[in-house]
Image (cartoon, grey):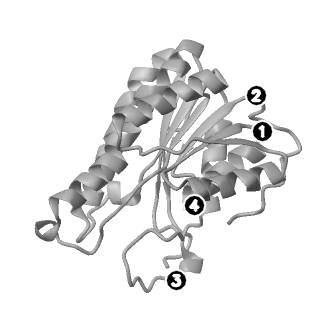
Amino acid sequence: MATNIERDAVDPLGGQVAVVTGAARGIGEAIALRLARMGAEVVLTARDSARLTQVKAAIEEQAGKAMVLPCDLTDAAAVAALGERVREQCGRCDILVNNAGVGVLRKPLIDLAVEEWDQMMDTNLRAPYLMIRALAPMMVAARSGHIINISSLAGKNVLLEGAAYSASKWGLNGLTYSVAEELRQHNVRVSVIAPGSVNTGFGAPGSTKDRSRMVQPNDVAQVVAMLVTQAPTSFVSEVLLRPTTKP
């Protein structure tokens, strides 16, 4: 678990509430820790409540604020209930990071089970829609907010034996670009980050890539920190994040 969450000298996100999906590990954990360090109260959500509790403890050890709301993001009723709990307990949602994702790789599309297709589409594309639907109305009412979707360079390029995963991320990119246009009139900014190979447990089994050369979870968290502190007169709509040296 990441531990380098000493608080910033000035809390640029003080008083704000950030909801992070897939916050139990990897990129989501790193983002949650970084936003807490910046002064936000972070709502941690994923299915693994035990891991979420550990992330919450790490945040609180450094005088940060966090709450755990376990949720199956593929369940529309559960996501709607999560939105209501955020509204009731926090009264606001300033930042939403749709990070949760799954992938079945190294499998040709014709060999992919329908259940595997559905799992990827439900988690990678439908869940961000459900989360936006549940939480963006608070941003619209406040005329302020930032939604960040964590996509992938697989949503910009061909991915051999990963067609369904790639399709889910192409779809997430399209959702991001379009909802950004819908919400900007309400002063709500929507951005997408598309990382390349990230050093997490996610990815194709048996990979021989040098993990030390991959994008690190904290690298993605750094980009999130940049986006949510962007000057109010502009926003960065898309960030493509590649390793400096190919792994």
Q: Earlier in the sequence, mark 3 or mark 1?
A: 1
Return the disc, 4 or 1, that comes first in the chain's sequence: 4
Q: Which residue is mark 2?
A: 15
Identify the element where label 3 is drawn.
loop
Quarter of the image that includes the N terminus: bottom right
Q: CA distance from mark 4 to mark 1?
A: 20 Å
What amino acid is at disc 4? Arg
Q: Nearer the viewer, mark 3 or mark 1?
A: 1
Q: Are marks 4 and 3 in contact (CB under 8 Å)?
A: no
Residue 176 visible to an observer of this rendering:
no
Callout 2 secondary element = loop
Q: Are marks 2 and 1 in contact (CB under 8 Å)?
A: yes
Residue beneath label 1, please? 39
Task: Kindly identify which residue carries mark 4.
Answer: 25
Q: Which mark is residue 230?
A: none
Q: Nearer the viewer, mark 4 or mark 1?
A: 4
- Residue 210's label in the rendered image is 3
Under mark 2, the amino acid is: Gly
Of label 2 and label 1, which has the lower sequence position? Answer: 2
Q: Decide which of tag 3 and tag 2 comes sooner along the chain.
A: 2
**Residue shown at 44% from the left, 22% from the top:** 183
Residue 71 vs residue 131, the one in the foreground: 71
Q: Is residue 74 left or right of residue 195?
A: left
Q: Position of residue 69 (x, y in %)?
A: 57, 41
Whole-percent x and y of residue 42? Answer: 66, 40
Q: Amino acid type of disc 1? A: Gly
**Mark 4 neighbour density, 10 Å: few (under 14) some (14–19) many (20 or more):** many
- For label 2, count other residues whose C-alpha is less than 10 Å away and answer few (under 14), some (14-19) or many (20+): few
Give whichever of discs 4 and 3 has the lower sequence position. Answer: 4
The Cα atoms of the two marked residues, 3 and 1, are separated by 34 Å
In the image, is residue 130 above or below residue 210?
above
Task: Please report the residue visible at 22 percent of the width from the left and 73 percent of the height from the top.
Answer: 107
